[in-house]
Image (spheres, rainbow, N blue to C red):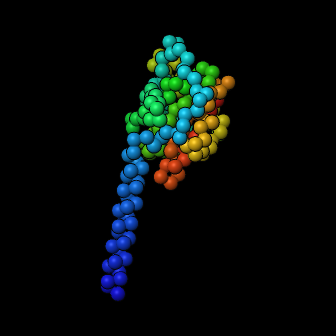
Amino acid sequence: MKTFLSRLFLFVGLLCIVFLVILLYQRYRPNPLAFAKTSGTMVLAESTAAHGLPVRLKIPNVAIDLSVYPATVHNTTWETTDKGVSYLESSALPGSTGNAIFYGHNWPNLLGPLKNTNVGDTIKVSFADGSVVAYTVEFITIVKPEQTKILDNSEDSRLTIYTCTGFLDQKRFVVTAVKN
């Protein structure tokens, strides 16, 4: 009986170690926020001369107040930061016509609280010149990385924020808002 229990505990311990390694890999791999492929309909951002790039993203109802860092996609590698939220520079400038795309890690100090966002919540994007553009959350969804339609450009002034979700971050939690 002792031999059986010792082998059982050894097996369970090894399983725990393997699971820990998988979770660590998932947490620190270099490109977890990427989509499988980038949509072909994204356009370059309009001129940033009027406001410059966004510097702050706030969702007051879920206590998100993050610095914004410009990011690009190189081949299939999406630049990301662990200090705030990334703004995809090739997407529309917030406040202009098109789809402004923001993304970040699903960590408690970053976009972890995004899952508590509700339809009707206000999202504010601030610029270096002090101007603010307000959006209202229109819909919330979960998609697979292959479902890149949420990244497509739009004919309205839209804001898309996404983060990873699900087991081993295999899906994307997406919040879409339209300009007030």
- Above or below 124: residue 21: below
Q: Residue at x 38, y 64 (%)?
A: 16
The image shows residue 173 at horizontal and vertical percentages of 56, 44
The front one of 41 and 26 is 41
How many marks overall?
0
The front one of 60 and 34 is 34
Q: Residue at x 54, y 21 (%)?
A: 44
- Residue 41 visible in the picture: yes
Residue 122 appears in which quarter of the rendering? top right
Image position of 24 (left or right of 132): left
The image shows residue 11 at horizontal and vertical percentages of 36, 72
The image shows residue 52 at horizontal and vertical percentages of 48, 17
- Above or below 3: residue 151: above
Image position of 126 (left or right of 140): left
Q: Residue furthest bottom?
A: 1
Q: Residue at x 37, y 77 (%)?
A: 8
Residue 71 appears in which quarter of the rendering? top left
Q: Residue at x 38, y 46 (%)?
A: 28
In the rendered view of the protein, which quadrant contains the N terminus? bottom left
- Residue 117 visible in the picture: no
The image shows residue 35 at horizontal and vertical percentages of 53, 39
Q: Residue furthest front?
A: 75
In the rendered view of the protein, which quadrant contains the C terminus? top right
